[in-house]
Image (cartoon, helix red, strand yellow):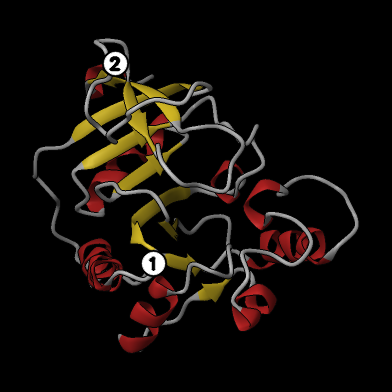
Amino acid sequence: MNRNIQFVTALHGNEYMPTLAIASLGLPQTIGNPKALAVGKRFIDADLNGVFGTHGEGYEYTRASELLQSIETSTPVIDFHTFSAESDPFAIFVDAHQFELAKKTGIKKLIYMKNNFKKGRALINHVTGVSVEVGTHTSPQSFEVTQQIVKNVLNENSMNHDVEIFEVYDTITQPGDYVNFQEYNNEFYPVLAGPNPYNFYGLKARRISSYDLPQ
């Protein structure tokens, strides 16, 4: 079994299901925002997963610096999240070289987000790894999906399952009747459409194949 993976949870303090799931397996993890997790809030002063590599005042800015110093840069990271929108789970990679790791999670929907809407300030813009959205904040599915992902990435066998790859290229700025991963008006596939903490209605994505990824 491959133990050469770092699990990061609760970069947002209201995303606690992955933390509980990994703890129940008795495996080590790095809790990104323990202070926000302790009080059940998304953050204390600023969105932690939007301040990596930046300078500012407040708890999350200090915590971002601490995390980047503590995470072993040569070891891949799986960063777990939950969401408020209705959607299938999906894995995000910002570097095409992390496609195989994203596939290793066993998640069928993979998001290539080279043009990250957080402008390079998310954790996976600064470490080697992928981010996984496992389900809604309080769903038992989020707990179960997290555990299955952990088992998949620790297993040395390759994953040969079929995947769907989407490339995010813009944000959704107009309200509409969006269903995640269902094509909207023959224009784009919505991702994270629905209730979310961001100042837009979701992300626009196009379908691609692994051959479209930069080599």
Residue at 22% over, 21% down? 209
Q: Compared with residue 67, is residue 127 higher up or lower down, i.e. above or below?
A: above
Judging by the rendered image, the residue that carries numbered circle 2 is 212
Closer to the camera in the image, 214 or 170: 170
Q: Position of residue 58 (x, y in %)?
A: 86, 62
Kindly state the secondary structure of the residue where label 2 is placed.
helix
- Say which quadrant the C terminus sits in: top left
Closer to the camera in the image, 72 or 81: 81
Kindly state the secondary structure of the residue where label 1 is placed.
loop
Badge number at residue 4: 1
Q: Is residue 153 left or right of residue 33?
A: left
Closer to the camera in the image, 205 or 154: 205
Q: Compared with residue 158, is residue 162 higher up or lower down, i.e. above or below?
A: above
Label 2 amino acid?
Asp
Q: Is residue 87 left or right of residue 214?
A: left
- Say which quadrant the N terminus sits in: bottom left
